[in-house]
Amino acid sequence: MTQTATLDLGNGESDLIGRIKTTFARRTEGRAVVLLIIVSIWALIWESTVFTAYEVTLGRLALIGLTAVGLTAVILMGELDLSIASILAVSGVVMASFDNVFLGIAVSLTIGLVIGAVNAFFVVVVGINSFIATLGMLFFLRGMAFVISDEEPVVMANKDFALDFGKPLIGEFTPRVLIFVLAFIAMHVFLTRVRVGREFYAVGGNREAARDAGIPVRRRVFTGFMISGFVAAAAGIIVTLQLTAADPTAGGNALLTSFAAAIVGGILLNGGRGSVLGTLLGAASLAILQVGMTFNGVESDVQNIIIGLVLFFAVITDPNSIRAVLGSARTFFRGRSAPDPAD
Amino acid sequence: MTVESTVEVGETPEPADPEVGVEQQDFNALEWVSQQGVFVFTALLLIFAGIFIDGFASVDNITDVFNRAAPIGIVAVGMTFVVISANYLDLSVVAQVATSAVLLIAVSNSYNMLLGMALGLLVAIVYGIVNGVAVGVFRANAVIVTLSTTFVGLGLLRWASGGSIYFGDPDGVIATFGSTEIGPFPLAMLVLILVTLAMHFVLTNTTFGFLVKSFGSNRHATRLAGVNTPLVVIGAFTVCAFGAMLGGWVLAAFSNTAVSSMSAGFDFEALAAIIVGGTSVFGGKGSVLRTLLGVVFVSALTNIMVLSGYGFGYQQMAIGALIVLAVSVDALARKVGRS
């Protein structure tokens, strides 16, 4: 708030309404805040167990939020990483195949980094659209998870470690939640205070300009995809530890929820705008929604419908989409062509 | 060289000077692989399989390949319109195929077949309009939009059907259609060929087809030319939805059963067929007939893998790698072409 007040452009709007206007124009988290408020009110009235059993909600938030935070780094640069769903499955299966848990975790995280680098290679060096490149990887890696696991869930050898992982570590917080909090803080600091992270916004906003300004665009895209791959691998490990077994079909819902969290959170799909805070708010509202529906006995199919609708409406209420629709409406009513906002 | 004689794009002049020709040759090679490669690769794959894979060339197996290829092919032919219009792909065909299959069998059992078909048509129109409006009017990303409609659609279908399997009447029209064969060719193959010819006609001989191509190659110019571009996008997604609907009917007829999970993998097998056929994911370039060839390639490849004992996982890996590889060749050909 204070930040936006000091950034007043001095065009006479120094009154309260003007400040509020600029704040709203600058922030991207609006939809996430609205959804969070609606969902919280719904949960307070009909399903208050969401808040009394907050460790369940926090656990769900940690799961949705972790992959979404990784995804944020990629979307900020105007790219997409659809392969996270399969990275999650592959890393879980690989981790569970090792008898030594720590070796398994190390190998899985390395695999996540390598897959991220491969994705970035296809996007940056070969020049394929990231949607198609990571879609191909999504199918390829899903197949790989099936091949490694022999199409069966892989049970962990060291179950005690997995059970310890589920116990509270500091106060009420389980390691899972603490990892998420750490990841969130690290990402927030990285994107707002570290130069490399700030440059992500420049790459997403205008790639040519970023290149002209001397930003190593290719290296930044590599960094982004590797962050997303690494974080997805970590999420796969956490899911596996939670279930004490790795499911090769895991990740389908993670794809939906993490995209929904990031897009509701206001990360512009064309890149350059958004904040991890928005992703956190988006993930929190989805976590409350999901846990609330589960406690309420809503079937998983209906949950998918609702989360799918949230994603659908989030993606069509993107600022660019709204501008496109308003532009077409203006053309339609006034009968003259407006400049095309999206091109 | 045969390489140069088969290049269709007449804009690149034949290099008279051998020194200039080195780079031109390079450009031609990649362009050629991405455009004409599918003919050679398909022929090589079929010859290889015929000689080395036991049981590939048998009549039973070929009928089986056709039965599997027909629904995927019909879906892929429809989705070609979406890809040519530079909207990447329609992931929601998975939900569309399963919905139309379940509607056909379930409604035929309790009411009558025509009502089931009418409902399927209605669902297809709804999918086409919803996806098309979100992508065309709202300019939303097609991958994310169709990802969300997949989850909504499959969720609705599973919720409504309870995930149960519907068995059709063993003596009904659907079962008869599914089991009729003309020589080694199932009737479904005839449907695929008819649909392909019809779609080919639409793409090459109608204004709509022309606009889809023109929108795919330059949406800005198409819009400035006064074309109602959102309608073109809605049209492309609706054609895709019709393809998915027909694919669902053929799929249901083949096994005379329908279940919400029966279309798993249709999205990427169709995409692989389209891209391998030489339709560019960058839009504006491609043909329905090429997609048909791509379907032959992908189906033969999956069949060879099944016959050689490679399971579902390996097939997914192969198709995923195929998509990335084919797009890479296309992208590199464009890169070399530009420089």
Image (cartoon, grey):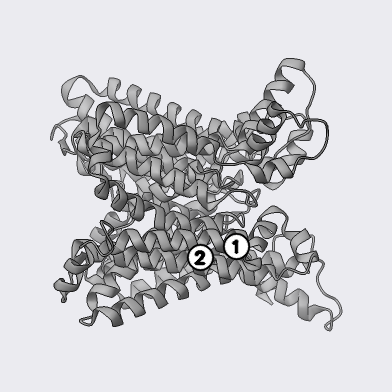
Name the residue located 77 percent from the left edge and 18 percent from the top edge: A335
Mark 1 surroundings within 10 Å by alpha-carbon count, few (fewer than 14), some (14 through 19), many (20 or more): many
Q: CA distance from mark 2 to mark 1?
A: 9 Å
Q: Which mark is residue B100?
A: none
Q: Is residue B87 left or right of residue B10?
A: left
- Return the residue at label 2: B324
**Residue B196: image x %, image y %?**
48, 43
**Residue A203: image x %, image y %?**
68, 60
- Return the residue at label 1: A128
Relative to B56, is A37 above or below?
Answer: above
Q: Quadrant of residue A161?
A: bottom left
Please state which of residues B150 and A91 is positioned toward the viewer in this rendering: A91
**Residue A149: image x %, image y %?**
23, 71
Q: Secondary structure at mark 1?
A: loop
Query: Label 1 near label 2: C-beta < 8 Å?
Result: yes
Q: Quadrant of residue A25?
A: top right
Query: Which amino acid does the dot numbered 1 rest on?
Result: Ile
Chain ID at mark 1? A
Q: Is residue A308 left or right of residue B7?
A: left
Mark 2 surroundings within 10 Å by alpha-carbon count, few (fewer than 14), some (14 through 19), many (20 or more): many
Quadrant housing the C terminus of chain A: top right
Name the residue located 34 percent from the left edge and 44 percent from the top edge: A287
